[in-house]
């Protein structure tokens, strides 16, 4: 539908690397591991290589890392 803010296509499968990511299955977005928000691939800026998960915002990434620090310690 034209004018929709909903990304076109389905969820991409992505391999997160240190400074880039590789799309291994086509799609237009990934899902934030913390918020569940859809992140268009063009807007994807935050992810964890170790966990292989994406984050919508710096705050979401911080939340995920903080939670991991508590659960590992």
Image: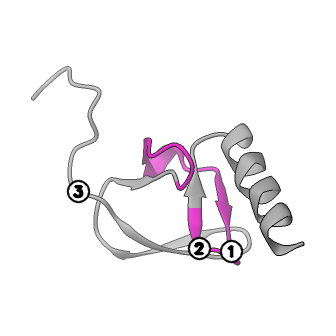
Residue at the (52%, 43%) spot, across then down: 35
Residue at mark 2: 52
Residue at mark 1: 49
Residue 39 horizontal side relative to residue 62, left or right: left
Q: Please name whichever residue, 15 or 67, is drawn nearer the observer in this view of the structure.
A: 67
Report the Cα–Cα distance between label 1 and label 2. Answer: 5 Å
User: Callout 1: helix, strand or loop?
Assistant: loop
Residue 48 found in image quarter? bottom right
Q: Are marks 1 and 2 in contact (CB under 8 Å)?
A: yes
Residue at mark 3: 10
Report the Cα–Cα distance between label 3 and label 2. Answer: 18 Å
**Residue reaching furthest to the top:** 3
Placement of 56 over or under 11, stated as above or below: above
Residue 26 horizontal side relative to residue 47, left or right: left
Could you say where residue 65 lies in the image, as x and y percent from the top left?
Answer: 78, 58
Could you say where residue 13 lies in the image, as x and y percent from the top left?
Answer: 38, 72
Question: Where, quadrant-wise, is the N terminus in this rendering?
Answer: top left
Q: Which residues are magenta?
A: 33-53
Asked if the stretch drawn in magenta spans residue 28, the answer is no
């Amino acid at each position: 539908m034209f004018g929709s803010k909903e990304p076109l296509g389905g969820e991409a499968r992505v391999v997160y690397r240190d400074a880039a990511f590789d799309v291994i299955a086509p799609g237009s977005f990934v899902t934030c591991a913390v918020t569940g928000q859809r992140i268009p691939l063009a807007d994807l800026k935050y992810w964890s290589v170790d966990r292989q998960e994406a984050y919508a915002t710096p705050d979401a990434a911080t939340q995920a890392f903080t939670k991991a620090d508590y659960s590992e310690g």
